[in-house]
Image (tube, coloured by chain):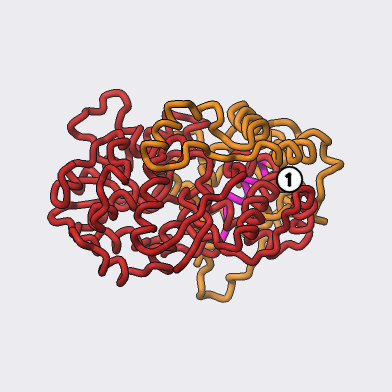
Amino acid sequence: MKEFVLYTGCTAPVRLPQYEASVKVVLDKLGVKIVDMKGANCCGAQYVESVNRHAFAAMSGRILALAETYDRDILAICGACSGSLKWIKHSLDNDWKLKDEVNRILADEGLEYTGKIQVKHLLQVFHEDIGYDAIKEAIVKPYSAVRLAAHYGCHVTRPYDIVRVDDPENPTIIDHLIEIAGATAVDYTGKTRCCGGPMLAMDQEVATKIGMDKIRNIRAENVDGIVTACVFCDIQLTQVQFGEGAQDESRIPVLTLPQFLGPALGIEPSRLGIGYNKISPSRVFASVVEV
Amino acid sequence: MSEPEHGPEKDVEYHPNSRFSQEIAAEPGGEYIRKCIQCGLCTASCMVANYTDKYRPRRIIQKILLGEREQVLASELPWLCMTCRLCEERCQEGVSLAEIFHVVRDIAAREGRVPKVFKDTVNQVLKDGWLLKDAFSDFIQDDRTDLGLNPEVNFDGEFVKKVKKRYFEQGDKEEVKDE
């Protein structure tokens, strides 16, 4: 059985705990064992990353070193965290001065980065560690007549040379999983474009326009829901639909990938935290379960 | 993936001679400045540029190439890149604007020129060890319990004190440079 140590990042446990819960329940069902990383810190993405390269390396480097004490690869469920950890792992593995620098600051608490563990985003665990065939075999309640749009998240898939998840121009993992579960994966304009989340700090108005651009493109394809694989994307694509002038009935449900897969695997929606989603995905689930 | 596989010129490097572009090229990630041919594919791909006239990534790179150091470092524009890397996926010359802007931000930060929202967020993270300690309430603990999760989140607040002391309180002299 494959085992991972889960690094949740800062945001999922507080703002999207249903994602954390559904990851655990779905991976358990598919035979992947997860342990929580204890005593972690922020990976430093975006903010520390922008102001001091060495501080960023120390913060993500500590998370990599902590994973080594568990002797397990890291499972990251957030695009920003998986991107940061992979980026810093790449830097540490190719820059011995930086690695020495990070190990000096880690030595106080008996930690050391040696590079022996890998970092995987959730999509890789589904694709590489569990595999499409095993997921297909585990589907007990396939969806029918449900149209879904996949949103991958920029930092999940780019830059390919570092993250190695999926084709950055034409990603397909979420689409495959949508189809395997019996639903229809729908293509749309601007599929690989950003949700606007990283712009929230500097210019909320522009961030919302970018998010709504995506929602409009998805709505044009007449879908029942959006499937995400990043904490920030999920939150951003949900909250932009509550802005001024947005109408209740036209809101498109946003759900995380494990929340989508769960019911098809025979998992009770309550264990997937479906009730915590701000836009009820009941129309997505109508064909498989009573919500 | 970002490099074109055809053509004899894929390793061509240009040598912009402004002092500012050389300063950027000397830092890890900044070397991409040598590859830009100012074609504008970045601006054409950019979702931020699509929704605000003030932001044109090609133009910021042009200012760097022209050596407009003060103008670039004093501006908020290099902080508007979402680092979504859509432009660099499309750039035919293999330029990473996200990396160039990270170097520009790093240099600006050393000179104390950080937008307030970045400064505040960095201070928060370096105080608590993680981003959302203030938002982590009893209500969220209850939600976590209902979801079958550990109500506690177990973040460490000590390590960041060392990070803060080493990289943010002792000035540049303590920073290890990659010479």
Q: Which shade of the palette goes to chain B?
A: orange
The reply to whether residue A205 is visible in this rendering is yes
Residue placed under numbered mark 1 in the picture:
B20
Q: Main secondary structure of the magenta part?
A: helix
Q: Is residue B55 above or below residue B26?
A: above
Residue at the extreme right: B173
Above or below, B118 relative to A172: above
Quadrant for the C terminus of chain B in the image: bottom right
Left or right: where B49 falls relative to A47: left
Task: Name the residue located 58 percent from the left edge and 54 percent from the top edge.
Answer: A85
Residue situated in front as seen by the camera: B58 or A190: A190
Q: Residues within 10 Å of mark 1 (few under 14, many from 20)?
A: many
Q: Residue at x 45, y 46 (%)?
A: B46
Front residue of this view, candidates A253 and B38? A253
* Residue A265 percent coordinates (x, y): 26, 58
Residue B65, percent across and down? 66, 48
Residue depicted at x 53% and y 67%? B3
Mark 1: which amino acid?
Phe
Return the x and y of residue B164 as percentages of the image width and height: 74, 36
Q: Which residues are magenta?
A: B94-105
Q: Is residue B134 left or right of residue A210?
A: right
Relative to A181, is A69 on the left or the right?
A: right
Identify the chain drawn in red. Answer: A
Q: Residue furthest top?
A: A244
Left or right, A118 with reference to A223: right
- The subunit letter for the residue under badge 1 reads B
Residue B110 image position (x, y, % from top left): 75, 37
Residue B11 occupies which quadrant of the picture?
bottom right
Q: Is residue B33 visible?
A: no
